[in-house]
Amino acid sequence: MSTSVALHASSLERHETASTREPAWVKAALITVALTFFAVFLLLPLGTVFAEGLRKGWGAYLAALINRDAWDAIKLTLITAAIAVPFNLVFGVAAAWLIAKFEFPGKRLLITFIDLPFSVSPVISGLIFVLLFGAQGWFGPWLQAHDIRIIFAVPGIVLATIFVTFPFVARELIPLMEAQGSEEEEAAVVLGASGWQVFWYATLPKIKWGLLYGVILCNARAMGEFGAVSVVSGHIRGQTNTMPLYVEILYNEYNYAAAFAVASLLALLAIVTLALKTLVEKQTRRQLQEITEKSGE
Amino acid sequence: MSIAIRHISKQFGAFKALDDVSIDIPSGELVALLGPSGCGKTTLLRIIAGLDFADQGQILLEGDDASARHVRDRQVGFVFQHYALFRHMTIADNVAFGLRVKPRRERLADAEIQRRVKRLLELVQLDWLANRYPSQLSGGQRQRIALARALAVEPKVLLLDEPFGALDAKVRKELRRWLRQLHDEIHVTSVFVTHDQEEALEVSDRVVVINKGKVEQIGTPESVYDHPATPFVANFLGSVNLFHGRVEDGHLHLGEHALALGAQGGSEGKAVAFVRPHEFDIVPGWGAGGGLPATIARVVSVGPSAQIELSRLDGELIEVTVARDVFHLLGFSEGDQVSLCPRHIRVFQAEALAA
């Protein structure tokens, strides 16, 4: 998805010719509009987060981050990501492999299903789990009988996060793998490599940048997810509060400085993610270019 | 190791890629599978390797049925059209790959692997590139490395899928001569797929001409070129002039003209005839020597031979090639009226062409 966009962008890079050159005032106007929009809708809110968080000084900022509730929220967010990301990494690679290398009936349907978490509202995603595992849900009585808590507990949060971040890795790898074909894998098999060796030595090096890109996006979403997690969490402080939920609680308690302080951590995560993403994107683009050059020979 | 291909058929949906193909390849031979693109030759090669599976039929390697054997256990080397080198590995690591992925108890010592890689790189004359990456090599070099990598595991059979298809004409010519020399050195049974008839004729011991999933003819390069068994083979190998006519009492009748067929004759009835461009004698004047009257339309006299384009009385074009000095000796120029006397005509019944 994103890689294919990157590919198009690189092929669209072109030299300005007389026929496509615009008058200076058009250029200036377009640049002004774009920059204004960028400043008002992107830079301003981002700045506000940090400004509001620091309004009461560094002391209050640090105090908002270094306390039990905040720490529990950060910890839960990290745990959730630490489970959801590896899970989706494995699933994503497996699904992409299946879709890119094999022909089977129902393939289109599977691709559509992988996209499902992107197309439904996160709140609905959360509700699905409540309907399945909640006290009144399908498996509710059985779970209660066996004293297993999923909804309003950590397992529910992890499940909802996995569901929402499902497509990132697979979606990233499918077009990449389809473009790469499987000649190297075939070469490896003929040379005697086992299935695992083929994956490790032939496939993984080809897809590693795309994979990393998917993992970064997946991680960012896993840590930042609000809607689905909010539905299944129950907002129990110190137990089922992730960072985004904690921000909301603080905000509703009129504790703005603390709310923005925690929010600034998420904002920082976003900035780091973007920086990483740009780096990795460059690598992926280079890799795709190599493929295009190769097939263009 | 000998390869026996027995009644192989393969279908892709409604498309019949291979239709009851049987070929015997004796040990140590270099065989070309030649045919137009889409004729099924690559599919056949992949079935021999075990990368594809036949719907029917068997592949016997050294007399043993290998149909159920996994690619890994067939002891074949495969060279791909686009090299399929591992681009994140150095050239030396690429060549060593097949030796390193072996299970521990079969694996050679590291020093021995390195020694072998060095020897293989010397064999393909690229030992000075050992520490480079594939992207730093030219196409011809990459293909030689791919060959070294395939040979590293000492395959009993070497399969090459359009090995020179992605290279430019000059490199291609060099490389195929080199492949022939290499084969004479190591004598591993080799099958290579090509759509380039010149390549097949120049390199191989035997040529298998395939069309629409069926074997048209198997034979040495000379025999398939000089004695094509079917109209397709006559048409596909080398350039050729095609005539439609009738055979009656030892003559090929083309409209109001008749050409003597000589001793070989031909069965009576509607026929198609093929004459190669270099198998004509040109005689000045119409009607001379019982030849076919024509007018010289165009002459391209570059290189060792002159390409002459002539138009028959009914407007159809004929191509004739003569040695350049012979052409100058004859002293023809464009617009001259001449007669064409074929030295050799191959006649097929017209129904055979439709089949």
Image (cartoon, coloured by chain):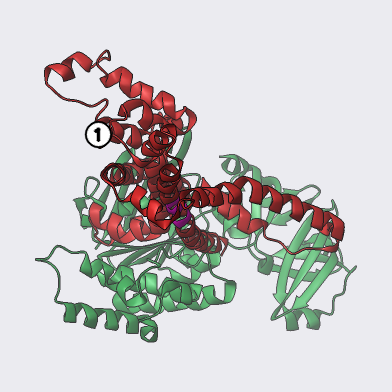
Chain colours: A red, B green
In what quadrant of the picture does the C terminus of chain A appear? bottom right
Relative to B152, A222 lies left or right: right
Q: Is residue B85 visible?
A: yes
Q: Quadrant of residue A226?
A: top left
Q: Please name whichever residue, A242 or B352, is drawn nearer the observer in this view of the structure.
A: A242
Q: Which subunit holds the residue at mark 1?
A: A
Residue B9 drawn at (x, y percent): 37, 40
Relative to B70, A272 lies left or right: right
Residue B86 drawn at (x, y percent): 37, 66
Q: Is residue B51 magenta?
A: no
Residue A39 drawn at (x, y percent): 65, 51
In the picture as drawn, the residue positioned furthest to the bottom comes out as B128
Q: Which residues are magenta?
A: A267-272
Residue at position x 37%, y 42% from top? A222
On screen, residue B282 above or below B3: below
Tell me the SS state at disc 1: helix
Tell me the amino acid under the disc marked 1.
Val
Residue at position x 83%, y 68% from top? B298
On screen, residue B342 above or below B46: below
- From the image, tell me which residue sits under label 1: A154
Q: Quadrant of residue B310?
A: bottom right
Residue at position x 40%, y 31% from top? A110
Q: Quadrant of residue A259?
A: top left
The crowding category of the residue bearing disc 1, from other C-alpha atoms within 10 Å (few below 14, some 14 to 19, many at least 20), is many
Relative to B210, B257 lies left or right: right
